[in-house]
Amino acid sequence: MELEFSLEEFAGPLDLLLELIKKDEMDIYNIPIHRITSSYLVEMKKRAIPSEDIAEFISMAAYLLEIKSQMLLPDHSLESAYEDDKDPRYYLVHRLLEYQKIKEATLFLMAKEYPLRIYSEDLPLILPKPPKASLDFELSSILLKDAMEGLLNRRDDQSRSRLYDKLKKDSYSVFLQQKEILTLLSYQMKIDFSSLLKNAPRGKQVASFLALLKLAQDQRILLHQQENFSEIEIQRRSRGKS
């Protein structure tokens, strides 16, 4: 029996844009802003958007219209793909790409680890709703996703039966991993991602990853990477920092 993960809770404006881009076979790196804006507004009218989410959709509509107006200026041409942050579409494209990666990372972990049931909090088949536009969270999430994929892939050559026998004896709570991470950060200024998970069982690695993702979403931690492929540093976010 195949596992199927529902994406019903991923129903925000970014998801709608990605759906329209895929449906109309648009180039995500060179989005025809007039076309995507028109399609987005039409779809908004068709769909029954929950009252608690309508402001988010309206905000995105206003953002698209703003980009559309900027693209009408002489300095910009719809014929050329964006090259840098001077293109009004740059940050929209960036957010769409990062958001897409976060979804893929979440599905990757759920599909890979859910059958093993390796920690006490059952993973929901409906994915948690992502936070409203937070660039810090988006960037933190993709950093964690890349680091976690590396850790998991390094263990793919281990014996599956031996690994399963070990994992099924362990039970890890995402909530308790959050508490453990915050406790460590109360004694240390920062923690390296690799040292946090070094020699940890695979179940604890995944529970810790999801705990870090939740803490980043709640803006309780900061993640820094000096350069590509360098160590990821985890720091506790000060209360006054937003």
Image (cartoon, rainbow, N blue to C red):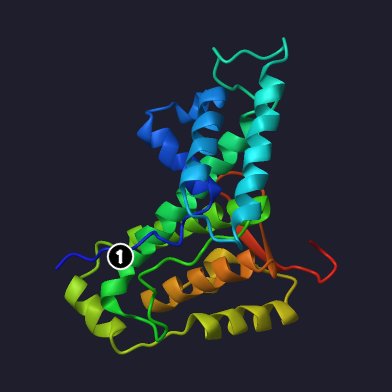
Image coordinates of residue 35 in percent, x first then y, are 51, 25
Whether residue 175 is visible, yes or no, is: yes
Identify the residue at image location x=57%, y=15%.
Answer: 78
The disc labelled 1 sits on which kind of residue?
Answer: Lys
Identify the residue at image location x=52%, y=48%.
Answer: 99
Count of labels in the image: 1
Residue farthest to the right, as pictured: 240
Identify the residue at image location x=53%, y=30%.
Answer: 38
Identify the residue at image location x=63%, y=43%.
Answer: 60
Whether residue 225 is visible, yes or no, is: no
Q: Is residue 22 left or right of residue 189?
A: left
Q: Quadrant of residue 91?
A: top right
Residue 209 lies, with reference to residue 77, above or below; the image says: below
| Image quadrant occupied by the C terminus | bottom right
Image coordinates of residue 28 in percent, x first then y, are 47, 31
Query: Toward the viewer: 36 or 216?
Result: 36
* Disc 1 crowd, CA 10 A, few/some/many (<14, 14-19, 20+): few
| Image quadrant occupied by the N terminus | bottom left
Image coordinates of residue 3 in percent, x first then y, are 23, 66
Query: Toward the viewer: 40 or 71?
Result: 40
Q: Is residue 214 left or right of residue 111?
A: right
Residue farthest to the top, as pictured: 74
Q: Which residue is mark 1?
A: 112
Q: Circle 1 — which element?
A: helix
Query: Toward the viewer: 65 or 112?
Result: 65
Image coordinates of residue 151 in percent, x first then y, are 41, 62
